[in-house]
Amino acid sequence: MCIGIPGQIVERLADGSAKVDVCGVQRDVNLTLVGDAAVGQWVLVHVGFAMSIIDEAEARDTLDALQNMFEVEPDVGALLYGEEHR
């Protein structure tokens, strides 16, 4: 199963990547597929790549659904909150 995780761009980096905040955890994400994404926008992240730009409402709905999944499937915690939540 493939899961895309919504994150908000907090910093664009010179190499075409960005710092993206996912539930308070900042991750380095490649922006090659969404090159025009700007700080403050939400992107759908999968295996370190931003796959698409999404609106905030969709991002929040998806995060809510993933957080509900985390309550019954703890492995989802690593996706949302980092590896220490495995």
Image: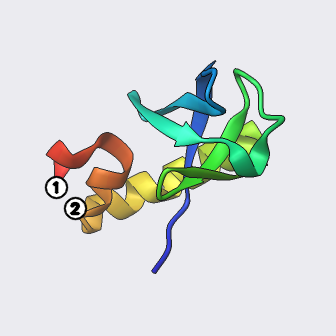
**Residue under label 1:** 86
- From the top left corner, tell me how far across and down residue 48 is, in percent: 49, 50
- Residue 42 visible in the displayed image: yes
Task: Return the residue nearer the eye: 83 or 47.
Answer: 47
Q: Quadrant of residue 51?
A: bottom right
Going by the image, does 29 lie left or right of 78?
Answer: right
Task: Return the residue nearer the eye: 27 or 6.
Answer: 27
Mark 1 secondary-structure assignment: loop
- From the top left corner, tell me how far across and down residue 32 is, in percent: 70, 46
Q: Name the kind of residue labelled 2 in the image.
A: Pro
- Residue 54 visible in the displayed image: no
Tag 2 near tag 1, CB within 8 Å: yes
**Residue under label 2:** 74
Task: Return the residue nearer the eye: 12 or 4.
Answer: 12
Q: Is tag 2's residue or tag 1's residue first in the polypeptide sequence?
A: 2
Q: Quadrant of residue 81?
A: top left
Mark 2 secondary-structure assignment: loop
- From the top left corner, tell me how far across and down residue 29 is, in percent: 53, 40
